[in-house]
Image (cartoon, rainbow, N blue to C red):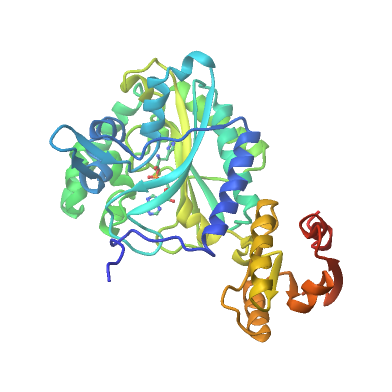
Amino acid sequence: MIQSIRGFRDILPGEAELWQKIQRIASDLFEDFGFKEIRLPIMERSELFAKSIGENTDIVEKEMYTFSDKGKEWITLRPEATASMVRAYIQHKMYAANQICKSYTIGPMFRRERPQKGRHRQFYQINAEVFGENSPLVDVSLIFMLKTLLSRLKVDDVEFHINSLGCPECRPSFTRRLKEYLEPKKETLCADCVKRSVKNPLRVLDCKVPSCGEAVADAPLLTDFLCPDCQSHFQTVTKTLEKRNVPFIIDKKLVRGLDYYTRTTFEVHTGALGAQSAVAGGGRYDGLVKALGGPNQPGIGFAIGFDRLAEIVGLKKEDCIQTPDLFIAALGETAMTQAFDWICDFAAKGIASEMDFQNRSLKSQMKLANRLGASHVMIIGDDEIEKGEAIVRDMTASAQVSIPLKGIVEAIEPILNLG
Ligand code: HAM
């Protein structure tokens, strides 16, 4: 038997309905906040990710699915969506139509990480990005939108972690200071962090290896190095979040695993997921549009891990699954032929109905109707066809009504209480 690839999984019926519901709730909310959907390709030129996420990040160094396209060019299955969003924004000159451009996208991402609970090689993200606005109020509105979504989905065990990563004005002096701090501690760092301490020292700050955590316990903090503009931006963000009653924790060691961030960065953590506790992450990337060849327009956004979100939502899977409005228990060939016509016509009218094609006994058909969770059952055999009417039974109320078979497609709707 051919099995799926390690780290790649099927989202089966039963689970998929829950995903659809989450997706609908997210899209409706985002659209109320002025976001429009954008659909992006899942493959891009490899250089897009190297230039945006950064050459010295785990994602680009170790985790990308990169292929040569018949020797013509290098292409990569996208490990995230922000880079593609920026590419599309520049390529289609989306900045020309509106000063502020708000887009969201939902789809699969690919990272060759070690699979474990909450970590897959193909996983899904819900992304929202805003281009063209520097105001710290946009940072707040995004975080507020994320918080609103989580409460609509009945996710309550969450913490918002927030930090500022400064800008090209103030970050270099911090990076220099951090390198100096790390230099004498190299022996206690993990092999990856020894390299990072030279090439990308910020990443040492959130390494999960305990000895690295100890080594950076007294490390300098970026928030102490912010320039006046970054400081005031961060202050407005935190003050406005307080005003809007969004609880958060200032996490001075939060650096994120992608290099494009500037100023406000944030992550949402939950106690409900075990080791992979980050449900969402995001932040500003004010220099990225320009770095990828576009105009000097700021950007900010977030991505929610869909797989992780689906694990922790307070919605019940059973409530998301559509069950048939009607099961037609047909007895005999003539009734079956008639029932088949009806189920086609019912479905075309938006009435979900099912039947059995095997001419089973009434008892087996009733069992099947129960298993499918049909809310109504209609029994039809030669007698009913001759009389020109049949009984429709409401399975929950245990009530039943008689219905004329002529014009049944029109007559059935009010009986099924479909409103
Ligand atoms: P990220 O932190 O790499 O950020 O990913 C965002 C979320 O995707 C994570 O918090 C997690 O829930 C989920 N995720 C990441 N990797 C996996 C995996 N292997 N399996 C399951 N879930 C995973 C970004 O991707 C940025 N592009 C976010 C962003 C948007 N920043 C600005 N705009």
Q: Residue at x 69, y 61 (%)?
A: 342
- Where is residue 328 drawn, in percent x and y? 69, 71
- Where is residue 119 drawn, in percent x and y? 37, 58
In the depicted structure, whether residue 265 falls above or below residue 386? above
Q: Residue at x 52, y 21 (%)?
A: 133
10 or 154: which is nearer to us? Answer: 10
In which quarter of the view is residue 9 placed? Answer: bottom left
69 or 240: which is nearer to us? Answer: 69
| Residue 61 visible here | yes
| Residue 163 visible here | no
For the N terminus, give its image quadrant. bottom left
Q: Residue at x 45, y 35 (%)?
A: 39
- Where is residue 173 drawn, in percent x and y? 30, 27
Specify whether 5 is left or right of 186.
right
113 or 2: which is nearer to us? Answer: 2
Specify whether 8 is left or right of 379.
left
Specify whether 107 is left or right of 72.
right
In the depicted structure, whether residue 359 falls above or below residue 115? below
In which quarter of the view is residue 316 placed? Answer: bottom right
In which quarter of the view is residue 46 placed? Answer: top left
- Where is residue 303 drawn, in percent x and y? 46, 42
Q: Residue at x 52, y 15 (%)?
A: 97
In the depicted structure, whether residue 270 falls above or below residue 331? above
Find the residue positioned furthest to the left.
71
